[in-house]
Image (tube, rainbow, N blue to C red):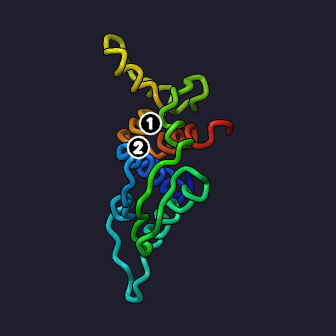
Amino acid sequence: MADIHIEEFYRDTAIVLVQLYNAFPRKVSLYVEDISGPDTPDEFGLHSRRHRACFGAMLWLAEEGHIRYQDTIAQDAVDQVVLTQPAFTRLNAVVKIEALPASLAGTYPEDTEGLPPAIQAEYATNIHLLRVALKKGNSSLIADAVQAILFPAI
């Protein structure tokens, strides 16, 4: 993928979704620096392009109905944020292996033979797919996982 800002968008989106899933159904504050890394505003108090892009990704997720929040804390965080019901349902859904991009097919699903049924069921979900992609740290895998979850018809 050539466009670094799109790679960053997918990574930020994956991190936001995993953090909110881990906190669900509690409302939490999501700080941009916890997702995109430390930021040093310039002499005019403006945040870096990277910081603004991460904040923009959070707002986009809300505008598209994936998350809901009560307020923003300047451009530093979204406050009282939670996954929407459709996003929570999509993250809990079973991965459609046949619909996965080729890049994910070789890395997912993991071998679950011999594991308890509850663990096997957890490993078959979209949220686990997202966690695996983030753990591997490969930008293409992260992008493919986010696309498979947020844009399943594409």
Q: Which residue is mark 1?
A: 127
| Quadrant hosting residue 116 | top left
> What residue type is disc 1 on?
Ile
> What residue type is disc 2 on?
Tyr
Q: Secondary structure at mark 1?
A: helix
Circle 2 residues within 10 Å: few <14, some 14–19, many ≥20: some
x, y percentage for residue 105?
51, 26
Q: Quadrant of the C terminus?
A: top right
Nearer to the camera, 143 or 32:
32
Q: Residue at x 62, y 42 (%)?
A: 151
Q: Residue at x 48, y 48 (%)?
A: 83
Mark in the foreground, 2 or 1: 2
The reply to whether dot 2 and dot 1 touch (C-beta < 8 Å) is yes
Circle 1 residues within 10 Å: few <14, some 14–19, many ≥20: many
Q: Which residue is mark 2?
A: 21
Tell me: residue 55, above or below residue 94: below
Nearer to the camera, 143 or 31:
31
Left or right of residue 54, residue 153 in this image = right
Tell me: residue 59, above or below residue 41: above
